[in-house]
Image: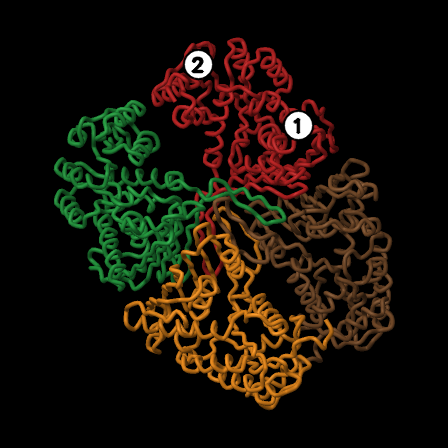
Chain colours: A red, B brown, C orange, D green
């Protein structure tokens, strides 16, 4: 592929996650090249730009407007997403936006309007859809291997408590953490019409004092009648636990956890395997790379977005419904056109 | 062990499940011997008696009263359980009673009263507690291996639809099938204080017409704040799917399905393992045998019942609450002293 | 099946292994019934007979001649096998004889002659052929799943050192232990034409002083050009390690070890599974039962022996060749008609 | 780490494997930077140089002599290794040389002399030592987890036949393919003193006509008395099969194959996992990266070479012995100081 035909990407935000995206785009995506980065914090932006041989823009607006930028990756903090989307929509640039689009349902609706009105190619960054294992579950649903889907089970547990300061602004467990699982449920079983959620503080009372929960169970009812059960914990001491299972009329597909290696040591006390991966960037390294491949392919060849702006909105709608269900203690109906 | 010190057991009911129990007691329980059987159907009773070299009683009363019967195994149909318990309580004979004690909550309360008043050794036949794998999960909870329990996940799916005629008298999915899982949840996480359940008809409309459901999800909240999620299906075409997982502050213990053997065939299309076991008697062969070992040990040496009459009642209470939750569409509180 | 059509079996030898066979035949083989036992040690014979409701013969000759005995199971010590085979051949009774037929090649040849001349149905007790997992490997070879066989790998390691007194009369590691693996190699890949073996004393010098080895590797070349590699150890401290793998032009089939249950405990140090089974009777419980089913079926319906007297001889021939190869330090050719 | 302290690496050879090394050094090794490449084929060298923002040298000598090159990576064809080593030894530059050092034992001895005389830091590129799984087996040996080592098992099978043209100049299966396994055996169990090998042509007669074999079994006896068994096939149709197992007085450590993901699909025909990885660069991606980390660390901090020039020679010695053993049909002794 000649350099000229590669999608030229400018990235807004080079914090921990933005830096990872920058390295991936610069080095691992055959169909793309990184041309520019921007961050409100100048030094990190310059450091990343120098290391990756790209330019550092002085503002998000400069980056979006640059004629060396075909598409904008949005990896800045959640509360800035909407304004960058507005810039890109105005400039007619394609967008790959990290999840969640916004913690505010009003802003999310506005993002949908902007994208629809402008017609820009838009993809939401739900990376787990691009994990080869979870994707294989999706394929087993789509190709009929498991028949009609009846039940989906998702266990999603983080290896470490986030800092309390973060928790206070995170939007809460459902918006911050389970939102990935709400997307996964939709990816496998389609639109959601009812949400039941309950949660508790079992790990650390300080989390409760901060107004959040640390352990939750959510039951989603889909438009097709199937049911998804999600369990979340903020602290799985054994690692990053990420399992997805779809069960249907003909069988079951299960995506299991991954380990760094598969060496077993067996002695008289039994057999031991090494711990699960702990770091999400390691666990989902393939997924992040393949996410950019999908975006590049989508912008180049058109067709439906791999993860549309509507797919970006629905988990936010579900997260709000989950929070409300927990508050009220009953299931909450969701508009099927939104959920 | 001399023959004289073995527990002499009389079995009431030699249908499919009673016949299995008879063979186990006669042949595989070092601490017990089968001395008598009774069934309302004479021919099967005589056939079993002849094959196992034991006597066939003319009535349940004769069996319970016999001086060659130290303990009574109740494997007859559910609606006869209470009357045999009454006979045994009156005669002061130990009892091992198949689940459920009764489909009627009133009868179950009566059974508890009878057992408590008479002081007879009593065990409820929740066989899955004696499965080596599920028991290892229990031990990991009890010995602190997983820390404080936060979440329990149970998948319990049957390999074949029961006949519609059976479904109509089964008491419904929660009472007939999920009752085992309600017991498992209590075995791992203790008393239940709240139940949320929802179900649907995804497999066969005839099941709905018969007034039942075929697919269900139940969320139990335990007195200790932990949560159990159970999913049930009447038809897992791939086999008898029986998985239990407990997650806590230090780790996770998971009991996986078993196969007849562990041969894998690998070719260019991937690796194949043989199907799951389909028949509950094969899957839980160890459990049924170990259940009788536990009963024999309990009667011989006293101490708390491995599965008390209260443990027999609680899942019935939970099953009623689950059915009510599904009808009302909201969680239902359960008296912690009963649940 | 009516009692009259069952194969009536008399068992010679009720030591540890004979007792196991007696219980299996008496209780778990639908097509057979145990009618008589004999052991040179009277008390054990009477004890087993009483427990299983059968007769105790006064001599092997009486048992073989009895008109209540259709088939003779030979589980007595190896040095008595030939004489019982002689009695059975003379009486025209079917025989199931434990491995090895004899430690003496001359006696083994004589056994083949007797069986061939008399035409009695004869089966050698190589139980591992009837293990469901190993059998599935065999089937994958036979049905073409793995294509033409190229390599076979067998790991066969015992969980405990035998007593030194036993080792001195055992016939040596190749004859006593690896003989099972030689049979497995033939079961999967057919006749053997060359043997290379080497061994050492790595576990306990006393074994060397007793004239034996405790660790060995054997390379068998089959008539079809494929190669089998076997490793043996007298002491796998972690349990009874029994693995078989066949590799061919289209794939690979592997029979893995079995555990009592499949519960995993995962914490920050990794994931633990319970130890392997240690006791061969537990590990091969299915195999022993299915071996008798196969014998019963064979005697009832004719056809080729599941494990013929020739199949009983070949591993003895191979074991002798292995011992010779080790002594000489070079491969040893085997007559393809015998190996 | 500032740029100044990174090890500056020049790579000779940018064919398939050299290109992979170039990308790794340029992008994934924190302690190193790629500064120059050379290849006898000019265009590929320029293309790689341009893509990775480094210089292309006009000759190997220029590269080795450059003051922007601290260390030389040798990835050119095997027959050029010695001359580059000579240049590097003369220039006092550190070397990382791909396996095998040479197909000629005389050249290998000369390489050892050059390295020893010059004292340059030298590492042989046996990448599999750096695979996390195989390394965990090594650690289980070193830290006593499995006690004293008794047996090592290695299965090493390639997913595709190499072109016949390649086979004719490859040096033969033992030198070209099994050499990795000979190194692995030494890595786990130490020096080798005796080699028995046998092989055959089971896959394609053309391989035999080309003077090679396609299937082989090798038995290595180590100085410590333990034994390694290796099986090799040129064609495992199901993928790149790479398994290593060490067995000792206290236990066993096994490094199993890896898959791209761990999703299972279960239906009534059983459970299916996806195929094994097929491409060695995918399978050993971690190993290649960690190999360069180890080299960088070694050059920076001294100490014994992770894979010394002696470790590079020994597998060549063993490969020659294996070929001789196969020709002669007997085991071949190896000088323990070389093996």
Same chain shared by disc 2 and disc 1: yes
Question: Up-down: is A31 above or below B239?
Answer: above
How many residues crowd mark 2 within 10 Å: few (<14), some (14–19), many (20+)? many
Q: Quadrant of residue D294?
A: top left
Q: Tell me whether the residue at label 2 lies in contact with that at label 1, contact meaning CB atoms closer than 8 angstroms.
A: no
Residue B151: horizontal and vertical position, in percent? 63, 44
Instruction: Name the front one of labels 2 and 1.
Output: 2
Q: Circle 1 marks a residue in which chain? A: A
Residue C119: horizontal and vertical position, in percent? 54, 79
- Disc 1 target residue: A318
Horizontal arrangement in the rendering, residue D118 relative to residue C69 (left or right): left
Question: Up-down: is B58 above or below B314?
Answer: below
Q: Residue at x 29, y 54 (%)?
A: D186
Q: Circle 2 marks a residue in which chain? A: A
Lower position in the chain sequence, tag 2 or tag 1: 2
- Mark linked to residue A310: none
Q: Nearest the camera: C167 or D79?
A: D79
Horizontal arrangement in the rendering, residue A268 relative to residue D318 (left or right): right
Residue C66: horizontal and vertical position, in percent? 63, 87
Question: Up-down: is D282 above or below A334?
Answer: below
Q: Quadrant of the N terminus of chain B?
A: bottom right
For numbered disc 2, what is the local secondary structure?
A: loop
- Disc 2 target residue: A69
How many residues crowd mark 1 within 10 Å: few (<14), some (14–19), many (20+)? many
Q: Quadrant of residue D111?
A: top left
Horizontal arrangement in the rendering, residue B222 relative to residue B247 (left or right): right
């Amino acid at each position: 592929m000649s350099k000229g035909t590669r999608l030229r990407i400018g990235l807004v935000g080079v914090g921990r996650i933005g830096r990872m995206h920058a390295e991936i785009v610069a080095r691992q995506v055959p169909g793309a090249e990184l041309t520019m980065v921007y961050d409100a914090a100048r030094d990190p932006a310059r450091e990343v730009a120098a290391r990756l041989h790209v330019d550092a823009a002085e503002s998000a607006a400069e980056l979006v407007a640059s004629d060396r930028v075909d598409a904008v990756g949005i990896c800045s903090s959640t509360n800035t997403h909407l304004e960058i989307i507005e810039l890109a929509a105005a400039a007619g640039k394609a967008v790959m936006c990290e999840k969640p689009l916004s913690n505010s349902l009003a802003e999310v609706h506005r993002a949908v309007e902007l994208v629809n009105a402008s017609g820009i190619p838009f993809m939401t960054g739900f990376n787990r859809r691009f994990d080869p294992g979870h994707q294989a579950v999706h394929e087993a649903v789509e190709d009929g291997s498991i028949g009609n889907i009846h039940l989906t089970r998702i266990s999603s547990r983080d290896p470490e408590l986030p800092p309390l300061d973060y928790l206070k602004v995170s939007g809460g467990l459902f918006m911050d953490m389970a939102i990935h699982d709400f997307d996964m449920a939709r990816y496998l079983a389609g639109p959601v019409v009812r949400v039941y959620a309950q949660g508790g503080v079992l790990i650390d009372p300080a989390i409760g004092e901060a107004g959040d929960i640390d352990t939750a169970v959510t039951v989603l009812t889909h438009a097709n009648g199937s049911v998804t059960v999600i369990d979340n914990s903020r602290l799985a001491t054994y690692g990053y636990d990420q399992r997805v299972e779809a069960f249907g009329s003909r069988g079951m597909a299960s995506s299991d956890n991954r380990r760094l290696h598969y060496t077993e040591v067996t002695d008289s006390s039994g057999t031991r395997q090494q711990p699960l991966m702990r770091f999400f960037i390691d666990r989902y390294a393939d997924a992040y790379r393949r996410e950019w491949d999908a975006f590049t392919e989508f912008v180049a060849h058109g067709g439906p977005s791999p993860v549309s702006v509507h797919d970006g909105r629905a988990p936010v709608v579900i997260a709000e419904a989950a929070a409300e269900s927990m508050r009220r203690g009953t299931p909450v109906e969701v508009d099927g056109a939104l959920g």
